[in-house]
Amino acid sequence: MRKIRTWQLCRTGVHGSDGATITEQDLNEILETFSPPRPISLGHDMAQGDSFPKFGDVLALDGIYPDPKRPGEKVLVGNVRLHSALDEQFDDGNGEGTYNGWSVTIPRRVSDGKRYLHSVAVLGATPPKIPGLDQLKIKTVYSDGDQVETFTFSEKLNYQEETMTDAEKQKMEALEKANKELEEKLKAAETKTAEKTPAKEEKFAEPKTDEAIKARLEATEKELRQNKLERFSDAVSDKLPQGVLEKAKSVASVLVDVPDVSFSDNGVTQTSSALKVFQDVLSAWPQATEETQLYNFADNGNGGNEEKSNNWAKVCSKL
């Protein structure tokens, strides 16, 4: 059988004849730097010699809590286990034990200046530097695994609540009631806002997703392409015979997708779309029935040296 005791190990405030001050920051540093287990000695002197035995361990630090007996102060709470020989002599409140107090040694580390828990000294006749530290709970653990917990004070989970006065409890109930009323008002306001939201969203019922934007762009590009081909057809339809016009439209349907081209006109470089260049060339042709002296070309194997009168309908039909 063994006992796990829960002790208030250290308290903030000014203590002892030398006015040593312990702050909440000190308690936080002890909690941060704690490395279990830390030894328990009989008196402080035994903790300074390597040959002296230890009489227990500080197993864990439970946390930092408000001191119920001293408003505004904080206490560091930890779990300790005493050696069986010391455990039998420790006074649990019945006045029969020879040891009933304890005191911590909390120096500062050289590396970073933070406080750490070096050891805990169990005291007898000498009073501790920090008076009034309480034993909060004793957990008795038997060999068969059963556990019996004896509470000297209130359970740790209700550590602060159980120390409240009736006036403080009434004030807490009033605050909880006010908070509940405020939460209900906020929920009602959120519900009212949510009821108005759908009416505003109806104006924007069609979200502009990536797919919708892409489809709209494709439709616009298709419409522009069709308009270009229609303008081309209107510009050359009265200048070309029907047979050539259909072929020209087929060529135009390919050139409409060709990027702008650059060409030289009387030494001046110009840039235009391929379709526009093609349209300008066709628009400059005479009427299909008009005959014009254009150039010499080979026809029926005569060598191409004879000047001919060219029929544009025949020339176009050969393109």
Image (cartoon, rainbow, N blue to C red):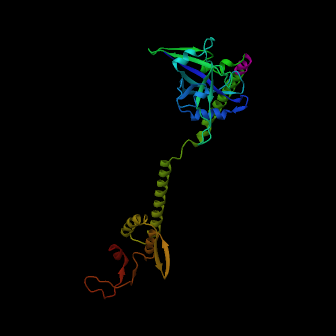
Between 28 and 156, the residue placed more toward the observer is 28
Left or right side of 301 for 291 = right
| The quarter of the displayed image where residue 175 is located | top right
| The quarter of the displayed image where residue 67 is located | top right
Q: x%, y% of residue 263?
A: 46, 76
- Vertical side of 130 occupied by 218: above or below: below
Quadrant, the C terminus:
bottom left
Identify the residue shown where x is 56% and y is 20%. Answer: 5
Q: x%, y% of residue 155?
A: 60, 18
Q: x%, y% of residue 187?
A: 64, 28
Between 280 and 205, the residue placed more toward the observer is 205
Between 282 and 51, the residue placed more toward the observer is 51
Q: Give the range drawn in magenta.
A: 166-173
Between 139 and 290, the residue placed more toward the observer is 139
| The quarter of the displayed image where residue 32 is located | top right
Residue sitting at the far left: 301
Tell whether position 256 is magenta: no
Q: x%, y% of residue 219?
A: 47, 54
Left or right side of 270 for 201 = right
Left or right side of 22 for 61 = left
Tell whether position 170 is magenta: yes
Identify the residue shown where x is 45% and y is 15%. Answer: 143
